[in-house]
Image (spheres, rainbow, N blue to C red):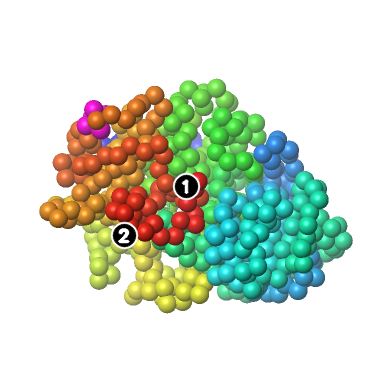
Amino acid sequence: MDYEVIKKPESKEIKPAPNLGDYEKARREVKWVDVATDLDWFGDGKINIAYEAVDRHIHSHRKNKLAFVWEGKDGTIEKYSFYELSRASNKFANVLLTLGVEKGDRVFIFLERVPELFISALGTLKIGAIIGPLFSAFGPDAVKDRLLDSGSKVLITSPQLKSKIEDILEDLPDLERIVIVNRDGEEVELGDKGVNYEEEMTEASEDFDIVKTDKDDYAIMHYTSGTTGKPKGVVHAHEAVVGHYATSKYVLDLQENDIYWCTADPGWVTGTSYGMFGPWSNGVTQIIYEGGFNAKKWYHIIENYRVTVWYTAPTAIRMLMKFGDELPKKFDMRSLRYACSVGEPLNPEAVIWGETAIGIPFHDNWWQTETGCQMIANYPVQDIKPGSMGRPFPGIYPAILDDSYKELPPGSEGHLALKAGWPSMFRTYWNKEDMYNSRFQDGWYITGDKAKMDEDGYFWFVGRADDVINTAGHLVGPFEVESSLIEHPAVAEAGVIGKPDPIVMEVIKAFVSLKEGYTPSDELKHDIQKFVKKKLSSAAYPREIEFLDSLPKTRSGKIMRRLLKARELGLPEGDTSTLEE
Ligand code: ATP
Ligand code: MG
C-alpha cells in the first residue's frame, strides 16, 4: 500500500523511556521462563491470577494505590485501591464458599460494567472457580446457550438484567444460585435460587486464604466473538497471567504512573486480559467507564482523567473518525502518550488519523480469544507500517504456512500459524475437544486467519481463511478492499464479500455505510468503484456496491461478513447471538 512508514522516534526522545528499549535484542534473548519470574508464584510454583493481579500489590508500595476509578453512566464515581479491591474480592470469595461453589465450577457474570463485575470475577478466581463474563447487552438466547454449554453453577446478575432472561432460567439444570447485585436498592424478588449480593457481602469476612491453583488449572472462559460461526467456549488457565503481564508491559508499555483506559467490555477477551489482569498485574491504575461509545464523552474521559495509555478497537476509531478531526481538538488530549488497537484489521487510514487528529498514531496489534494475549504487535521503538499488524511479540513464533502446513517465504500469502506452547495459549474449547485438537498441526496452532509477512518481518492481515475471495483466478483479501474503500471521502465503513459467480467463481461485493452529509446514488457508487480500481487493481475493485445505514457487527465491534453473505445469498443466518442491535 502507498502509505509512508511512520518512523520510530529515537528511543531517547520517548518519555518516559519505553519498557521495551531494544526489540531485536528482546526477540533474540527473551524467554517466557524469565519473564514469569517477575510474578510471585506464591513462592512455591503455584499461581493464581487474582493474586498476581491484585493481592501481591498489597504487600508493596502499591497497597493504597488506586486500582481503578469507575465512572457510571449516570456520572457516579467510585474508587478502589488495590487494598480495597483485594478485601472486597476476598469477601466475595467467602460468599461463594457459603453457596457451595468449588474449584473448577463455572461462575458466569452477566452485569453492566460496574465495580461488582470486577470484584466478583476476582473473588471467583480466588476460590479456583472459572469465570465466564457475558456482555450485558446479550439477549436471553445468547445467555442460555452459554450457561447451558458451560454448565454454569452460579450466575451473577442485576435485577434489570435478570428480568430480561427470566424465561430461560428454568431451562438451566446446572444453575444452582443466582447472585443479584442490586446497586439501586430497589425491591427485588429473589426467587428460590436468588441470593442478595449486598446482604451476603456485609456479612462475609474480609479474610480469605486464596486457593493456590496450579498453572494449568482452568481460570477463564470466553466465548469467541462469533464472527465466523457459532461462538466457541475458549478456556484459559491461571498461567495466562504471565502473558497478560508481559504484553501489557511491553506492548501497551504500561508503567507505574500511567492512567490507562481500555474501552473493551469484559464480555470480550480484551476486557479481561487488558481490562483487568494485564494492567493490574503491572500495578497500573485503570479508568473504567460504564457507558458505551460516545465520541464527546470519550474525549472528555481522556481529558478529565489525564489518560496516558489508551487501548481501543478499529470500529471505535472509525466511529471517532466519522465525527471529524475538529472534535478532538476541542479537548485537551495532551496527556495521551500511547494508543493501541485490536479486534479487526486497522485500516492504514485510521493509523494516520490518530497522528493528525489526536497527536499520536494507533499501534495495531493482533491476537485472538484463543491466544489469550497479544501475539503480533507494533511497539513504541519500532517503525509503524500503516496497515500492518506489526512484528511478533518476543517469545512468540508466528509463520505463514501453505495448505500442507509448510512454511512459506516472505511475501507469500498463507495460513497464519503460531508455534504452540506460550503461557496464555488456550487449553481447550469447552465440550469441543476434537475441534481444539484440529487447530493444531505439526506443532503449529493454526489461527484461521490468512496473512503474509514482508522482508522486514512485519505481518499483514489478509482476511479470515473463509473470507478470502477467489475472483477470476485472483485471491483477494477483503481487508485490502475495505481499507481502500474507506479512504474514499464518503465512506465510513465497508464490509466486503465474495459472491458466487458462474464465470469468475466469485465477484467482489461491498457493503458500504456513508459518512454524514453523503447520500447514496448510482453516481457515488461509480465514483467509489473508480476510486478503488485506481488504488488496487481492476481485479480487486467491487463489482457491486450496496449502501447500508450501518453494517452488522458483533458485540465486540467486528463486521460480520458471514451475515452479509448469508443475507445476500438468502441462506440461513446461523448463530446471531453476538449480533449488535
Ligand atoms: P469467532 O472465532 O467466533 O469467529 P472471532 O474470531 O472474531 O470470532 P475473537 O477471538 O474475538 O473472535 O477475534 C479474533 C480475530 O479477530 C482474529 O482471528 C482476527 O481475525 C481478528 N483480529 C483481531 N485483531 C486483529 C488485527 N489487529 N488485525 C486483523 N485482524 C484482527
Ligand atoms: Mg476466531
- Disc 1 is placed on an element classified as loop
| Vertical relation: 168 (above or below) 268 | below
Q: Is residue 61 magenta?
A: no
Residue reaching furthest left? 503
Residue plotted at (49% across, 70% down): 429
Res 238 → quadrant: bottom right
Residue toward you, 375 or 202: 202
Q: Is residue 328 visible?
A: yes
Three-letter amino acid code of the residue under disc 2: Ala
Three-letter amino acid code of the residue under disc 1: Gly
Q: What is the crowding at mark 1: few (fewer than 14 residues within 10 Å), some, or many (at least 20)?
A: many
Which residue in the structure is indicated by mark 1?
557
| Vertical relation: 260 (above or below) 122 | above
Where does the image place residue 154, in percent across and percent down from the top left? 68, 67
Circle number at residue 465? 2
Residue extent of the magenta highlight: 523-528
Residue plotted at (24% across, 63% down): 408
Query: Sequence-wise, which precedes: disc 2 or disc 1?
Result: 2
Q: Is mark 1 within 8 Å of ligand 1?
A: no
